[in-house]
Amino acid sequence: MALGTVLPFWPALLFTYLEPISLLLGWNAAWNSPTTFVTGQLPTAPLTPVPAAALILSHATGNIFILLALLAVLCTAITRDARVAKYYLLFVAVGDLGHIYSSYKVMGPEVFWDFAAYNDMMWGNIGVSAFLHVNRLATVLGVFGGFGGQLR
């Protein structure tokens, strides 16, 4: 148990502290700069003006980021039940795959696999999601050490 969680040190640092901070930064971008948030999703020239529906989706995405940040803290720090942390990591790992696939589906393979053309937003959507996914699975598999508390 590390950093006040049932997780080993590296996953505790990543999922209890760094990821929620990152999600709050994402919320800030989606909420306070929705036009930039929307137009940064692809490396192409942005559509102007940005449709109102896209701006609404930016704000909705920001709200999801806040929810995920709170769930991360609840499931990795507030709870002391290792099962909750384990299943939270598994469920969010499924969400990582959905997040990556949704980018692929819209971008298409030519843009998705052209890593040199990625902007910061695309690296966050795809690269960071893949990094978190691998770390979530590694944590559940015990690569970084065991969970504190009982797993059933």
Image (cartoon, rainbow, N blue to C red):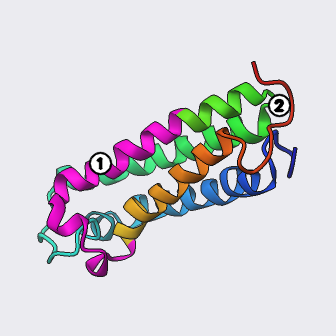
Which residue is the site of mark 1? 101
Q: Residue at x 75, y 18 (%)?
A: 152
Which residue is the site of mark 2? 80
Q: Residue at x 84, y 24 (%)?
A: 150
Residue 29 position, x and y percent, is 43, 65
Along the viewing direction, whichever of 151 and 15 lies nearer the viewer: 151
Q: Residue at x 19, y 68 (%)?
A: 111
Along the viewing direction, whichever of 71 and 13 lies nearer the viewer: 13
| Disc nearest the viewer among 1 and 2 | 1
Q: Is residue 60 visible?
A: no
User: Is residue 41 found left or right of 46 in the rendered image?
Assistant: right
What's drawn in magenta, residue-wise?
Answer: 91-120
Q: Is residue 110 visible?
A: yes
User: Is residue 116 found left or right of 105 in the rendered image?
Assistant: right
Q: Residue at x 49, y 49 (%)?
A: 65
Quarter of the picture holding the N terminus: top right
Q: Secondary structure at mark 1?
A: helix
